[in-house]
């Protein structure tokens, strides 16, 4: 595949990064419960701490990700990718060393701080790198391939966690994070688009620094010399109905997705007594179907349906699996719901591809950063809603028996995103014809 050849080192970096980052996912619930509430299947403190971490991480990413994306337009993608690649090592190293209450709190604090830089920035910068390297006609498929490789890293991490002990899982994750940073520094090449192709003098004398062979591009925002202000971000998001609706879809999908993330593992622990191996099995299903979807299904369907129709289908599947989780009546139902990821995983690549086609090569970092920032806003708001709701639903104080009610509410948030995506006319996601 041409996309793989052009993005080889980035894809290896993404695989390793996701492998390290997601490897502790199947064990972190047991580690948290063991450190805070040993011997129990329900723990409000663990739920609230997870919600606080998610809110702080989202708030930090909201502020930092557009700034990092904008800086990468000037200083290059690789230079800024070094930040999340290096920062992710610290919390994993602490968790590898110990998992008692003291070490858990040290991990919790460092993870909260570093995640503000790592999680949103890595995806934003990588997608901007893809946009720099891949022509517009093949960009949607390239985004799908990139997301599929990230899902493959997720699958590999779930397989490793399934067969390793808790301590070995944490140690291997820390080692993988170190390898990721070294590989990125040694092999990843800087792109030749955007700010990396301009010297400072050229940037001052010729603000857009357009190569002599460049074609007529879609309208651009004025180049930014400093971190984008809120007014500049707002001007970007209101510059077209496509941006506005993409922002709404991103927010409500992120709200529902973060709500599921904040709720699902504790729901399964309380209702079906899931442990590390069951979590690993569930995440393995999600990862395998997600990888297959983005590596195979999306490149096949995008040319036939277009990003907008595929976005509607993906959001419909996302609503379906949230509602199915909420009414799960047996331990195997979550596994069935997880199979819906084969379509729901396509939401983010479709949105990213749609907005990528609306700007030129010198604004890719800022645009992708803004969309990531909106998603981070949802990550801030979601714990404020779903953390107390989840703790209440899993307690004995509820007037009705529906432990999955918070998951159903997450499905309704995604339903709003679906309704907004239907209002996006196909013509809005097409770039103007070049003369």
Image: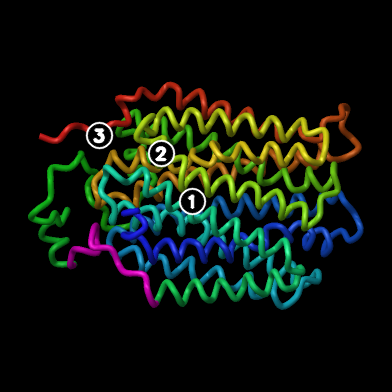
Q: Name the one closer to the observer, 151 or 97.
A: 151
Whole-number angstrom distance, CA of label 1 to CA of label 3: 25 Å
Q: Where 9 falls versus 327 (above or below)? A: below
Whole-number angstrom distance, CA of label 2 to CA of label 3: 21 Å
Q: Where 392 falls versus 52 (above or below)? A: above
Q: Which residues are magenta?
A: 186-199
Q: Quadrant of the C terminus?
A: top left
Q: Secondary structure at mark 3?
A: loop
Q: Where in the figure is residue 180, as x and y percent of width and height?
A: 50, 71
Viewer-nearest of labels 1 and 2? 2
Q: Which residue is mark 1?
A: 148
Q: Which residue is mark 3?
A: 431
Q: Where in the figure is residue 36, as x and y percent of width and height?
A: 83, 61
Whole-number angstrom distance, CA of label 1 to CA of label 2: 13 Å
The structure residue drawn at horizontal position 30% and vertical position 45%, both measured from the top left corner, is: 138
The structure residue drawn at horizontal position 47% and vertical position 32%, both measured from the top left corner, is: 248
Q: Residues within 10 Å of mark 1 (few under 14, many from 20)?
A: many
């Amino acid at each position: 595949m041409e996309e793989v050849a052009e993005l080889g080192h980035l894809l290896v970096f993404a695989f390793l990064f996701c492998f390290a980052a997601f490897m502790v996912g199947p064990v972190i619930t047991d580690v948290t419960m063991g450190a805070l509430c040993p011997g129990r299947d329900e723990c409000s403190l663990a739920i609230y701490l997870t919600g606080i971490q998610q809110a702080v991480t989202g708030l930090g990413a909201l502020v930092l990700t557009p700034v990092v994306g904008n800086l990468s337009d000037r200083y290059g993608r690789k230079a800024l990718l070094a930040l999340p690649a290096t920062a992710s090592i610290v919390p994993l190293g602490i968790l590898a060393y110990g998992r008692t209450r003291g070490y858990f709190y040290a991990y919790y604090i460092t993870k909260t701080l570093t995640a503000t830089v790592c999680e949103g920035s890595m995806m934003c910068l990588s997608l901007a790198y893809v946009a720099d390297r891949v022509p517009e006609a093949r960009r949607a498929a390239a985004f799908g391939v990139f997301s599929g490789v990230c899902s493959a890293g997720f699958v590999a991490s779930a397989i490793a966690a399934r067969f390793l002990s808790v301590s070995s899982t944490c140690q291997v994750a820390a080692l993988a994070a170190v390898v990721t940073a070294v590989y990125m520094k040694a092999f990843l090449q800087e792109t030749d688009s955007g700010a990396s192709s301009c010297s400072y003098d050229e940037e001052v004398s010729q603000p857009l620094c357009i190569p002599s062979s460049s074609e007529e591009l879609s309208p651009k925002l004025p180049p930014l010399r400093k971190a984008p202000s809120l007014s500049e971000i707002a001007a970007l998001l209101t510059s077209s109905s496509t941006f506005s609706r993409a922002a709404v879809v991103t927010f409500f999908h992120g709200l529902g997705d973060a709500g599921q993330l904040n709720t699902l593992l504790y729901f399964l622990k309380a209702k079906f007594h899931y442990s590390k191996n069951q979590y690993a099995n569930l995440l393995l299903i999600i990862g395998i179907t997600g990888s297959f979807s983005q590596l195979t299904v999306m490149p096949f369907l995008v040319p036939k349906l277009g990003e907008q129709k595929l976005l509607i289908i993906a959001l419909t599947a996302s609503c379906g699996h949230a509602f199915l989780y909420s009414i799960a009546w047996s331990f195997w139902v979550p596994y069935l719901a997880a199979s819906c990821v084969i379509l729901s995983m396509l939401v983010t690549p479709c949105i990213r591809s749609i907005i990528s086609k609306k700007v030129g090569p010198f604004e890719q970092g800022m645009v992708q950063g803004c969309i990531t920032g909106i998603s981070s806003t949802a990550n801030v708001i979601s714990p404020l809603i779903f953390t107390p709701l989840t703790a209440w639903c899993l307690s004995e104080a509820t007037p009705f028996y529906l432990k999955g009610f918070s998951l159903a509410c997450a499905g309704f948030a995604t339903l709003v995103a679906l309704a907004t995506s239907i209002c996006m006319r196909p013509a809005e996601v097409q770039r103007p014809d070049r003369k």
